[in-house]
Amino acid sequence: MSTFLGLPGLRRRSADGGAASDGAPAASAAEPWGPVPHPDEPLRWGESFPAAAKHTLKNDQLRKNLGHATATIRAKRAAVVGEVPDWEALRDAGSALKERVMAELPELLAQLEENVTARGGVVHWARDAAEANRIVTEIAQAKGADEVVKVKSMATQEIGLNEHLADEGIAAIETDLAELIVQLADDMPSHILVPAIHRNRAEIRDIFLARMGDAPPDLSDVPRELAMAARAHLRRKFLSAKVAVSGANFGVADTGTLAVVESEGNGRMCLTLPETLVTVMGIEKLIPTYTDLEVFLQLLPRSSTGERMNPYTSLWTGVTPGDGPQEFHLVLLDNGRTDVLADEVGRAALHCIRCSACLNVCPVYERVGGHAYGSVYPGPIGAILTPQLTAASGGVSGADDVNASLPYASTLCGACYDVCPVKIDIPSILVDLRAREVDADRGKHKVDPWRAAMKAASWVMSDGGRFGLAGRAATLGHRLGGRDGVISKAPPPVSAWTRERDLPAPPDETFRQWWASREEDER
Amino acid sequence: MSAREDVLNQVRAALGGSGVGTTAAGRVGTAPAAVAVPRAYRAAGEHGPGSAQVLTQLVDRLVDYKAHVRQVPADDLPTAIGEILADAGSVVVPPGLDDAWLGATGDAVVVHRDDPGAPLSALDLDAIGAVLTAARVSCSETGTIVLDGEPDQGRRAISLVPDVHVCVVLADQVVETIPEAVRVLAAHPERPQTWISGPSATSDIELDRVEGVHGPRTLHVVLVT
């Protein structure tokens, strides 16, 4: 492609695993947004969390955009959750239902398959990303399609479907506004629900003007005008698309019904107008019965967009003659989920309904942004899901695996658990994964300062006399403190700690010394 | 082994099954305990279907979503529809829509009745100004109207492509809570459903809500009381 026609460019992988976007202009000072390297592994990008966070923390604009957006959504969520008198009862039901799904997963999957098939759908199974990508590609090729329209879907992000289709000469057109922004900027998503949350309105206007091709030249940065530009840009695509690809928010085992929850109507367009629909769904997205929707369709919208109900929810069961796609394929995706399921503690991460409430309340996410997590699943849920999904390739236990650092991307404040609509105990899973990482790391280093320090501490603390002596020795550190009682620069090896933090200086006497002198005074 | 068998075996292994191998990471998990689902949430609201409180709440929610709402007695329904459609130019209606509803719609409005035998194409629908449908059930607490594709509502495409959706809701179809609505719909879960809560909208730019994106940008609800 030599002329940029306003269609998302087909991506060509470069040798180092990054990608270049054909037709899209190269990054320049005027276009600070891209192109961003696209990883071969959507669940494992580049640097470890601490290294990536160091870079993103320097981006003031990003922090400003995120701070504004997360504060807005937190307030909206709190207001609409507060007006539901039985919210906690709904959370209890949602949590137990998902636990039941995991316990009965083989039976429920078979039931879903049977019901979808009975209604004229075709069910495919995919062990991993490559297999799922191949299935979707073959369906699109069989239909002779050189482009497909897409509904926002985390599952297809996770398997890198768009990049794979591009390699096969099929353009995947993202139709969700935020996904479109990310795709046009050749960027990576930074949030589960609002992938372009790191962009403000002025940046979005600039992206549209530079990359959309048919954006009005006098486009302003008023959100309504930007949304109208996206509507005009995608309208023809919707009306002529032959194949659509979606994810699913819920798959109902006892009826074979699939559900997609959305706002803009791009989902309805994709699910209704094309002749062929392919839905890629993680195997954990099941719910047991149709009536269980009454729980999740209350929990999800209020937790995610902070609305009483999202504008549109589509439910379909196989193929309905004369209404919507007459060919329906459901791809059931494992891609590491069974490894998560095998973990007694960590399996609760599979209860996630992708609302993103935990991202919006997380003090760490709010400051570092989604890209620092190096996965399409950022934030607290990503910190427990990404390592586990990549467990087979070292995501939890690999000493040098960047994903093994993700469970440390948290202050363990617990806000994520409080807002989780299905009560996933994220902090406990984080601690469990940290322990696993430490266990795996043990003995891998010849000289391990951490282990040596712990061993020394154990020797000191196992004896009252030794502990008292050590305490007295520590008061020497008092002299390192400044006038404010804070050590901001300690000698090695403590300097590793004080490089990014202040350390309160020890007092000039220990509690034991004070207690002993007090008893002497009383005598 | 097929992918189906492989995936199901790995699920079984993850749940502690024996003789089915391990997961990809070489694990065999533990069997989870049986789970009882507590259902202490409200199965129904305080007010009955079609009660004054429920209708007031539905109107409040719809207006909050920037939908246009009119409340009319049954006799005035055709007049209300005629007024709303006056400037639409053309309207598409589902095959089973009550003819009387169009009794006061002027000749200036071209009426297309969607014919399952010769359905209008997406491009045809795009050239039509409005769509008029009935609904199956509505939930006041969330301001949600559900269409289930029956002949008085039509296939999903007709209520999607035209830019104005005029939806007629009968008072006794309005329930207070989502569980009540789901129980109505559970009689025919196989029908394709569209749950509508206001006109299409997006919050993708700085999480500011903007009404009117790809779906109908204008939603008129005529509540028949």
Image (cartoon, rainbow, N blue to C red):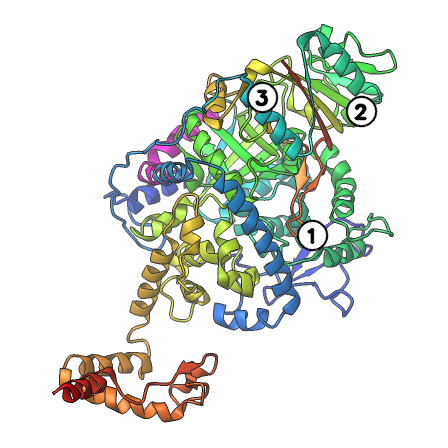
Front label number (3 vs 2): 3
- State the residue position of label 3: B55
- State the residue position of label 2: B129
Q: Chain of mark 1?
A: A
Q: Amino acid at mark 1?
A: Ile
- State the residue position of label 1: A181
Q: Are marks 1 and 2 on the same chain?
A: no
Q: Residue at x 56, y 23 (%)?
A: B192
Q: Is residue B205 left or right of residue B47?
A: right
Q: Residue at x 62, y 41 (%)?
A: A151
Q: Amino acid at mark 2?
A: Gly
The x, y position of residue B105, in whole percent, is 81, 12
Front label number (1 vs 2): 2
Rounded to the nearest angstrom, the CA distance separating label 1 from label 2 is: 29 Å
The x, y position of residue A171, in whole percent, is 68, 46
Q: Is residue B90 above or below residue A32?
A: above
Q: Chain of mark 3?
A: B
Q: Main secondary structure of the magenta part?
A: helix
Circles 1 and 2: CB atoms closer than 8 Å: no
The x, y position of residue A375, in whole percent, is 52, 58
The answer to whether any part of residue A448 appears in the image is no
Q: Residue lying farthest front? A: A522
Is residue A104 located in the magenta-colored stretch of the structure?
yes
